[in-house]
Image (tube, helix red, strand yellow):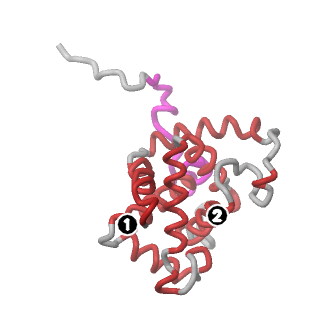
Amino acid sequence: MSEFESPALEAMDYVRRISRRDFMRAAAAFAGTVAVASVIPVSSAFAALPKGIRIMGEDEYVVFKRLMEVMLPVKGTPLVQLDKVPVMETLDGALLATMPPHVWNGLKGGVKYFNEGPQAEFGKKFVDLANGEAERFLDKWANSSEVPQRALAMGLKKLVCLAYWANPPTWKPLGYDGPMSRRAGFVSYGNAPMPKQS
């Protein structure tokens, strides 16, 4: 991993520390900006990317999209189909857009390293692997004794899964109707200390 080992590992440590609550908060903020963002002109450098993708370049987008296809085999299940929820847009706008620039740059290096990882064994990049090959590669790296491989596989998988499940329509097939605190009307006090009992 040579020249980008430290930045990529720092980015994976950042991803590891993201909680579901942090991501849900960012996803809610993202949902509120979708309408506004849709009127902002897209840069010509990102013309080949789908509408709504502002942070990822084509190189990162194709890797995350392939990860989504391999990791979320929802076709033929009661789960919400991938084309019915904005998974990549949620990942891009709700998480990647909130990363400090140096973390995002480290993650981009990690994504490139991950995409090139299967070439020794399969003679292809990750984005070109068949589903079975991609699953084997992900499992191998997720269980690797090599920290960079394990951190990248687990971190990238976490990002894609969070981006899917952050979309409220994905909850219904599970029988989940959202956070109880929201339904009950609880007021959020942030990180206020717990009340003391006398």
Q: Secondary structure at mark 2?
A: helix
Front-lying residue, 198 or 65: 65
Query: Residue at left 46%, top 36%?
Result: 180
In the rendered image, residue 186 lying in the magenta stretch gets the answer yes
Position in image of residue 128 (x %, y %):
62, 79
Q: Which residues are magenta?
A: 166-188
- Above or below, 10 against 145 in this view is above
Front-lying residue, 139 or 186: 139
Q: Secondary structure at mark 1?
A: helix
- Above or below, 185 against 93 in this view is above
- Above or below, 185 against 19 in this view is above
Q: Earlier in the sequence, mark 1 or mark 2?
A: 2
Residue with the most extreme left position:
198
**Which residue is label 1 attached to?**
150
Neighbours of disc 1 within 10 Å: few (<14), some (14-19), many (20+): some
Neighbours of disc 2 within 10 Å: few (<14), some (14-19), many (20+): few
Query: Residue at left 44%, top 53%?
Result: 7
Give the amino acid at mark 2. Asp
Indicate left or right for 39 with 158 as reference.
Answer: right
In the rendered image, residue 27 lying in the magenta stretch gets the answer no
Give the amino acid at mark 1. Arg
Position in image of residue 83 (x %, y %):
70, 61
Q: Which mark is residue 59?
A: 2
Position in image of residue 136 (x %, y %):
45, 80
Q: Nearer the viewer, mark 1 or mark 2?
A: 2
Query: Residue at left 34%, top 72%?
Result: 143
Query: Residue at left 54%, top 86%?
Result: 123
Position in image of residue 124 (x %, y %):
57, 82
